Image: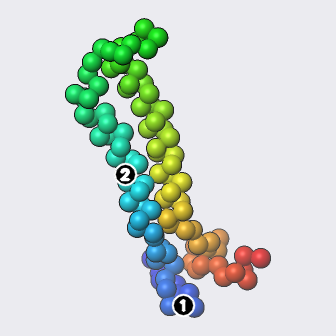
């Protein structure tokens, strides 16, 4: 892989710095469903029953939606934490603001 330097001396394969705080928040969002569902003792019971379903069943089903929301939120946070810098068509160098117009 050839290294094509941009005017600032950086190479095209170097990513812009990421916001590590936002990445940590995304990691916590992804860990929450894992921890909640692995802690079976917290939801291994029958009551309260909702629409004829015991707590054990509807709690797990609720996490299907909560996990989807947490994953989407983590995805959006990662996009914000790792900004994209546009490159030319062959990927050999970053575009400048003048090139984007």
Query: In the rendered view, does 89 fall on the left or right side of 1?
Result: right
User: Tag 1: Cα neighbours inside 10 Å, few (<14), some, or many (≥20)?
Assistant: few
Upstream in the sequence, badge 2 or badge 1? Answer: 1
Residue 27, how many percent across, how many down? 38, 54
Residue 51, how many percent across, how many down? 47, 11
Q: CA distance from mark 2 to mark 1?
A: 35 Å
| Residue at the image point whose x is 36% and y is 16% from the top | 48
1 in relation to 62, above or below: below
Query: Disc 2 on helix, strand or loop?
Result: helix
Image quarter of residue 50:
top left
| Residue at the image point whose x is 41% and y is 31% from the top | 63
Q: Nearer the viewer, mark 2 or mark 1?
A: 2
Residue 87, how many percent across, how many down? 61, 73
Display coloring: rainbow
Q: Quadrant of the C terminus?
A: bottom right
Query: In the rendered view, does 44 fall on the left or right side of 86?
Result: left
Pointer 1: what residue? 8
User: Tag 2: Cα neighbours inside 10 Å, few (<14), some, or many (≥20)?
Assistant: few
Q: Quadrant of the N terminus?
A: bottom left
Query: In the rendered view, does 62 fall on the left or right side of 39?
Result: right
Pointer 2: what residue? 28
- Outermost residue on the top side: it is 52
- Marks 2 and 1 close (CB-CB < 8 Å): no
Nearest to the observer: residue 44 or residue 74: 44
| Residue at the image point whose x is 49% and y is 65% from the top | 81
Nearest to the observer: residue 49 or residue 2: 49
Image quarter of residue 43:
top left
61 in relation to 82, above or below: above
| Residue at the image point whose x is 35% and y is 43% from the top | 32
């Amino acid at each position: 892989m050839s290294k094509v330097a941009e005017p600032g001396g950086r190479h095209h394969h170097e990513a812009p710095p990421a916001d590590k705080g936002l990445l940590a928040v995304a990691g916590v969002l992804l860990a929450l469903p894992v921890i909640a569902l692995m802690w079976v003792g917290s939801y291994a019971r029958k009551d309260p029953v909702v629409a004829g379903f015991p707590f054990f069943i509807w709690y797990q089903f609720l996490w299907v939606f909560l996990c989807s929301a947490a994953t989407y939120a983590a995805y959006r946070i990662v996009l914000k934490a790792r900004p994209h810098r546009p490159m030319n068509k062959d990927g050999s160098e970053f575009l400048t603001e003048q090139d984007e117009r």
